[in-house]
Image (cartoon, grey):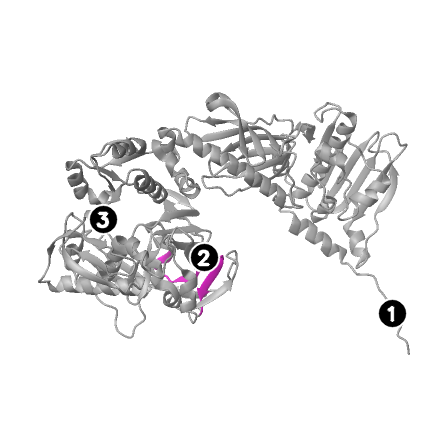
Amino acid sequence: MTERSTSFKVGIDFESVLRAISKQIYETPLAFIRENVQNAVDAIRIQAHRDSIGTDDDRYRIDITVEDRRILVRDNGTGMSAADLENFFWTIGASGKRTLEAQAAGCVGMFGIGGFANFGVCDTLEVISQTKDVPHGTLTRLSSVDIQAAGMAIPSVTVEASDAAAPRGTIVIGHLRSAPNNADLRRYLQDFVRFVPTVIYFNGDKISQAKFHDIENRENLTNIGAGIQKWCEGDLVITGGMYEDRGHALVASIEGLSIDGEPVNLVGHIRFENGPIDVFKRGFKLCATQIGSTIGVSGRLDCDRFVPTAGRDSLDAPTTSLLSRIVLALEKVAVEAVLESPERIAQHTRIFRYVTQRGLISRLGNVKVRLADGSESALCDIRRRAEQGGVGVFFGLAQKQALNQIMHARGHLVILLSADGHRQKAERCYLEQYCAAKPFDGVIDCVEYYKELARFERVFLSELELTISKSYEVKNFRLIPGKLTEDIPVFVKEQGANQQLDIFVDTRHKEIAKLEELGYSQILYSLIATFCREYLGPSLKKWSPRFFGDGALNLELLAKRRSELWILLKDDIGVVRKGGQRQVVTRSDVHVVNVGGGQSHTEPQPGKPQPRILHIVDEQGATGLQGFYIRLPEMAFSAYGDLLQDCDSRGVVWAGNKIMYVASDAVSTAFQYEIRVDEVVAASVNGVIRAEGAIQIEQPLQEMYGGVYFPIPSPLEPFLIPRGDVEIRLELHCDWIDMRTAKHWTPRESLGS
């Protein structure tokens, strides 16, 4: 028996396809009118190209009329024949604007799906169009009823003769499911068409033809350089000028571009401050986008080479690449302009990361640095004095003021490095490379060794040794108690790569001695750990396998070591994790700790759950730790609680019903501790009630009672601290993200109380 082959047609759920187009491709239901207006603009651009006149000629116009649930968009552009309507407008994926003529005219659309975006908000869509020199036009109509009636088949479009669009042009009529907000619709649409040269009316009011200037408020700007310049970067040549406003912000005006010798229309400006870049094509806005840069950029640009994605909320890959090349070329010009002036350098500290990354250290001669005697000097002047000989150059931080004065008295130059990390690195590189400068560390010494130690001094050293071993995994070191040559409490004397670290500790220094009055309590041990991280952390990180050379936590290594405690969610830091566990917190969960003045405090009873909330009371202000603290969940602490103390950047943000603590090494890793409550968090900040905000955390985390506690800023206390018999219900989430590896971890077990 011979089997005969058969076939069947591929089925399609047309209604689902339209839903995907209208709701998933387009970022807002308002996009349907933008698509219709953009089609009208393109039709006029093609007609103007054929007529060899500008699109701003008064014989062209577009009218948008909104009446209740009916929106009408009319243009007098090229129009479409019955065949064009069938083959292009009503065929998904087809477009009549992929021609050389459309490209030369500057058309925006080319994807062939814009018309179907209407069905995201329309019940019925009518398209009436007529080309010139034909007796009649064509009306086409499709409704939601037609689509539903077709089921799994392709619905049929109604076709009739019509003269409504005569003598030439197109009318699109959308019958909406609900009436739009006219003000919102106009505001949304005007953002896209305000620079379009063709006149566009919205209910009789003109919303287009604003002048697109390369740069605005030129009279308030000062030109830097010799007027109009040409900036070259590879095959790109950008024509424009660099300006500075009264607030010292830099702005690059752009008047032209050539790529490999071919002229390309490009006009606009780039402002060297963080923000979006609005991208246009012959006055029609494509989208707002962000371009990664070192010093930050914003602005607006109009270029014929720009192409959006189908949903108009981003740019295609070639456009993004071109825009990035333009921005990076201008960023280089801006940095060079800043480096020419000490005043500009003082206003634009963001350039120092760029300078170190691009190897421009030699260009830092105009940077002014502070000397130990309080005066200022440019780095180029210090270099000149060093090259003349007879003077030594040293650098360090402000804490070494006593030694600074000694060195100055000996006739040497002592530079106090900036507190900003990137600037400090750049200053140090220049001083070492061009001034033969040396750090202070080489001249610090111990002048008195302590032989007989008191009990508190022994306890301090023992706890410090434990913290170094546990938190940094540094094994080959020794602690040496003694008095140092300047008024500092601790100093790491590094030998060689494989040699022992000598850590000198002045156990009688005021910064250490003041802790004795706290007694031998959990708060003392927590503060010793804090002391270790504040004073020794930067030095120990260089010797610790838990950190990279730039100070970033090595989460990859730690996750492998503690695989029983971590879960790698996905190789995508964009994952949004659901879940968590609710907890109920009452007044009995608040534990009071008295510090300062020799007061004692009550330890939690053995066998009882550890306190969820700490209230540290410091009436004499001896420690500066007074306030409330909330405990990290147990499994999160087991997995990575010991890493949190090494995150120098800490803050808390709130919005809606969420409070999120964020701790970061400020390089590549960040911890997030999210707390959700049963009410809107509307906190008072400077006397103003705000439902969202952010506060930097200055107080250190407290590691006590086998866990870590985060400080609770006073504006957030009403939402986390139970009062009287009131219960507070909390939902807790914790996770780490690592930008270096694009990975995302969470505790392996569910979060316990």
Task: Name the residue tied to disc 1.
Answer: 5
**Dot 3 crowding, Cα within 10 Å, few <14, some 14–19, many 20+:** some
Residue drawn where x is 48% and y is 65% of the image: 568
Q: Is 126 positioned to the left or the right of 688 in the image? A: right
Toward which corner of the image does residue 61 lie, by quadrant? Answer: top right
Looking at the picture, how far across and down is residue 627, in whole percent?
A: 28, 54
Q: Which mark is residue 307?
A: none
Q: Which mark is residue 441?
A: 3
Residue drawn where x is 72% and y is 25% of the image: 54
Helix, strand or loop status at disc 3: helix
Q: Amino acid at mark 1?
A: Ser
Residue 284 is a magenta residue: no
Camera-nearest label, 1 or 3: 3
Q: Is 702 positioned to the left or the right of 731 in the image? A: left
**Stretch of the chain drawn in magenta:** 720-748
In the rendered image, the quadrant that contains the C terminus is bottom left
